[in-house]
Image: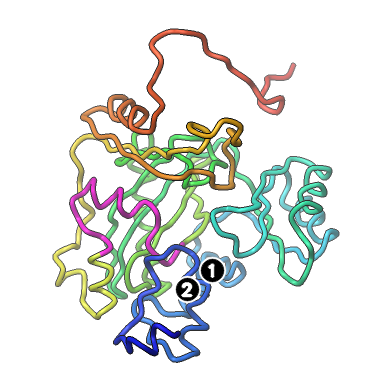
């Protein structure tokens, strides 16, 4: 507010700084800052679990079963009702901090003891869609029309934080049928929320059903990647929409096509810091990103690995570890 009072700007944009600006948007507006773009109420609608779940129910869009718990007993009851495995996290976390996937009561109780102090903030408990394909969508909405910037398929398995997962544009292993459903959900959600600018949707596909996991009414970390791949400056478009322009005025009314494949890969700390945690999960650990481009998916993926400091070995041994839960039983 000191900056706002000194600069006296015509508008303040909260879309381009990740989660933190969204968390303080309402306080800024109440203090007199002119918030441009997506409204504070829309931000709250997307962030508030109960309001957002109600919206998806009205829109008849599938979502993983979820619950909110304010104490240990409620958490156990919710996990039993949803059925293990479940994804657990403190509310309003950054970078997936403290999130975990638990498979039984003892694991849940251990996680609660380690991460939760029960000071009035709830724990979010969601159905974990094991073995699902995850998809990220970056899109623009001007309140009247939605244009998708890019649809990206995660390469890692479900449960790895989107910031740590490699992704490919366009998707290489998702049917046109499911892609059309994702496009339909994106348009309907953007218009229902009343987004003015960028928004990101995370989906999962399991057993031929497309689930919406969450919606972020802001620019996501994949926007620079999509902008470079498509040649369209999505952040610039979003800023102009915040000033009142329409997508038609900007000439961006169709989802762009790309030549070949673009792969985004995360740069992880254990490459240069021995002893750092090497297991990927719902808590984000990456410290940067690179991209590879080629006519084929495999070639683009190999380029991304080389850029991230993980050149693919041409000889040696492979160690394969199988989780007990995924081993075949007789």
Question: Where is residue 92 shown, x and y percent of the image?
Answer: 60, 65
The reply to whether discs 2 and 1 touch (Cβ–Cβ < 8 Å) is: yes
In the picture provided, is 138 more to the left or to the right than 237?
A: right
State yes or no: residue 306 in magenta: no
Question: Where is residue 109 shown, x and y percent of the image?
Answer: 82, 49
Residue at mark 2: 43
Disc marking residue 47: 1
Circle 2: element type: helix
Magenta range is 216-235
Q: How many marks?
A: 2
Q: Residue at x 35, y 75 (%)?
A: 13
Marks 2 and 1 sit apart, C-alpha to C-alpha, by 6 Å
Circle 1: element type: helix
Quadrant where the image shows the C terminus: top right
Residues 277 and 13: in front is 277
- Quadrant of residue 57 in the image? bottom right
In the picture provided, is 77 more to the left or to the right than 182?
A: right
Res 307 seen here: yes
């Amino acid at each position: 507010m000191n900056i706002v009072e000194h600069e006296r700007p015509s508008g303040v944009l909260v879309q381009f700084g990740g989660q933190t600006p969204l968390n303080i948007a309402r306080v800024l507006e109440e203090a007199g800052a002119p918030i441009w773009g997506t409204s504070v109420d829309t931000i709250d609608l997307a962030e508030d679990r109960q309001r957002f779940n109600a919206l998806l129910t009205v829109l008849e869009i599938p979502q993983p079963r979820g619950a909110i718990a304010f104490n240990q007993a409620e958490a156990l009851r919710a996990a039993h009702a949803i059925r293990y495995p479940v994804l657990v996290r403190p509310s309003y976390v950054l970078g997936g901090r403290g999130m975990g996937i638990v498979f039984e009561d003892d694991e849940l109780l251990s996680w609660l003891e380690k991460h939760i102090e029960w000071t009035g903030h709830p724990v979010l408990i969601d159905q974990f869609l094991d073995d699902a394909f995850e998809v990220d969508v970056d899109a623009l909405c001007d309140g009247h029309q939605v244009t998708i910037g890019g649809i990206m398929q995660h390469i890692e398995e479900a449960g790895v934080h989107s910031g740590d997962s490699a992704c490919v544009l366009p998707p290489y292993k998702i049917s046109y049928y499911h892609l059309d459903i994702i496009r339909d959900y994106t348009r309907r959600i953007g218009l229902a929320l009343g987004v003015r600018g960028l928004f990101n949707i995370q989906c999962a596909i399991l057993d031929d059903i497309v689930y919406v996991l969450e919606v972020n009414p802001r620019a996501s970390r994949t926007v620079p990647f999509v902008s470079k791949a498509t040649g369209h400056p999505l952040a610039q478009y979003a800023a102009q929409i915040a000033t009142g322009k329409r997508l038609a005025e900007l000439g961006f009314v169709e989802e762009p096509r790309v030549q070949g494949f673009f792969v985004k890969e995360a740069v992880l700390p254990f490459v240069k810091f021995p002893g750092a945690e090497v297991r990927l999960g719902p808590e984000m650990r990456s410290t940067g990103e690179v991209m590879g481009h080629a006519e084929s998916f495999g070639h683009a993926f190999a380029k991304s690995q080389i850029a991230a400091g993980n050149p693919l070995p041409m000889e040696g041994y492979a160690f394969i570890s199988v989780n007990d839960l995924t081993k075949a039983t007789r």
